[in-house]
Amino acid sequence: MGELMSGKVPVGMPFALPDAFGALRSLEEFRGKLVLLYFGYTGCPDVCPIDLAFIAAALRSLGAEADAVQPIFVTLDPARDTPEVLRQYAAAFDARFVALRGDEEETRRIARAWKVYYEKVPRPDGAYFIDHMAFTFVLDRRGRYTALFPPGTPADRMVVMLRELLEAP
């Protein structure tokens, strides 16, 4: 699987990262399912928890059809998002989430390939937050980037689009 395309601009790349349990997971293993790919971090105060809650609500609304959808959360903050933190965070939204964590270099490389902007922004107290793009990438059953949900896309809108994609040949 080479670069994924949206029009003429390459978006994405295949990758494999350890999940929150230490198993190496790749996009390839989810072929046959729609993938909802989200880049964020567990300390995000607003957009990440809202978007992940909407994804979880969409899965619940899909009922049995949700078995054909795989949500994936890739952390942009591997320094603070330890496997234990990721396990708890992902499970708080939905047990079907697969949370992935690379090292700083892998994270930067994968984020660039997916056109995901993020940057550590220092705070006066010495801590930092991460300014980041928050789109949910939708990959079709063949693993190709096919659409995206902008931040704050409500679950009911996701369900309409996901059902259309699930019905596609």
Image: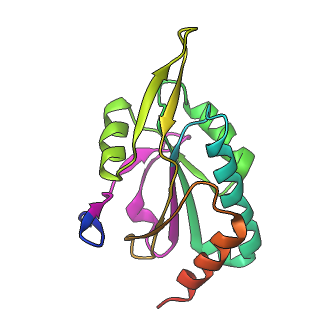
At 55% from the left and 29% from the top, the residue drawn is: 82
At 47% from the left and 30% from the top, the residue drawn is: 78
Q: Quadrant of the N terminus?
A: bottom left
In percent of width and height, residue 166 lies at 56, 82
At 76% from the left and 72% from the top, the residue drawn is: 61
In percent of width and height, residue 54 lies at 70, 58
Q: Is residue 129 left or right of residue 89?
A: left
- Is 53 placed above or below 58 here? above
Is 11 within the magenta? yes
In percent of width and height, residue 58 lies at 70, 67
Figure quadrant of residue 144:
bottom left
At 50% from the left and 30% from the top, the residue drawn is: 130
In percent of width and height, residue 158 lies at 63, 70
Is 109 within the magenta? no
Q: Magenta stretch?
A: 10-38
Q: Is residue 93 left or right of residue 141?
A: right
